[in-house]
Amino acid sequence: MSTIQPYSASSTSVPRRVSRSLAAIHDQGLVKLGEVQQQALVQTAKADAVAYVGRSAMLHVAMLSQAEQELAQLVPLAASRLQGIADTVTLTLAEVVVDTATRMRTL
């Protein structure tokens, strides 16, 4: 089985036109590779942003739920009101996560 040898522009046996064409193909390939790598970095940053906001929202919901439970034990008559407030905040946090994901898709 033969192996592919890397192209060398200094080869004198290759006509000038062929040499220029191969160099142009090589340059185009480098540009495409740079574009792909840049897109990967952008997509990774978007994923990181959504994950960061989601993780923060989950931590807030956990702390909110704990506070709701503790306060409901202290004042049982306020349990339904506390739950309503906690539900409102939780839904708002979920909206922030969805909004972040939507914004990242449009960037």
Image (cartoon, rainbow, N blue to C red):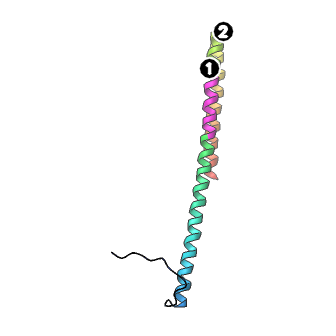
Q: Is residue 41 above or below residue 7?
A: above
Asked whether 59 falls inside the magenta stretch, the response is yes
Magenta part mainly helix, strand or loop? helix
Is 18 above or below relative to 6?
A: below
Q: Quadrant of residue 20?
A: bottom right
Relative to 11, is 80 on the left or the right? right
For residue 26, the mark is: none
Q: What is the quadrant of residue 52 in the picture?
A: top right
Q: Which of the two residues, 105 or 8, is positioned nearer the viewer here?
A: 8
Decide whether residue 70 is among the magenta residues.
Answer: no
Q: CA distance from mark 1 to mark 2?
A: 13 Å
**Disc 2 designates what residue?**
74
Secondary structure, mark 2, is helix
For disc 1, the marked residue is: 66
* Mark 2 crowd level (few <14, some 14–19, many ≥20, 10 Å Cα): few
Q: Residue placed at 52% from the left, 86% from the top?
A: 11
- Of labels 1 and 2, earlier in sequence is 1
Say which element carries label 1.
Answer: helix
Q: Residue at x 63, y 52 (%)?
A: 106
In x, y percent, where is residue 56? 64, 34
66 vs 103, nearest the viewer: 66
Q: Disc 2 marks which amino acid?
A: Leu
Residue 3 is situated, as x and y percent measured from the top left of the image, at 39, 75
* Residue at left offset 63%, top offset 14%: 70
Callout 1, which amino acid? Gln
Query: Which image quadrant is residue 53 in?
Result: top right
Badge 1: few (under 14), some or many (20 or more) residues near its Cα, within 10 Å? few
- Picture coordinates of residue 93, whole percent (x, y): 64, 33
| 62 vs 103: above or below | above
Q: Position of residue 61 (x, y in %)?
A: 62, 27
Q: Which residues are magenta?
A: 52-65
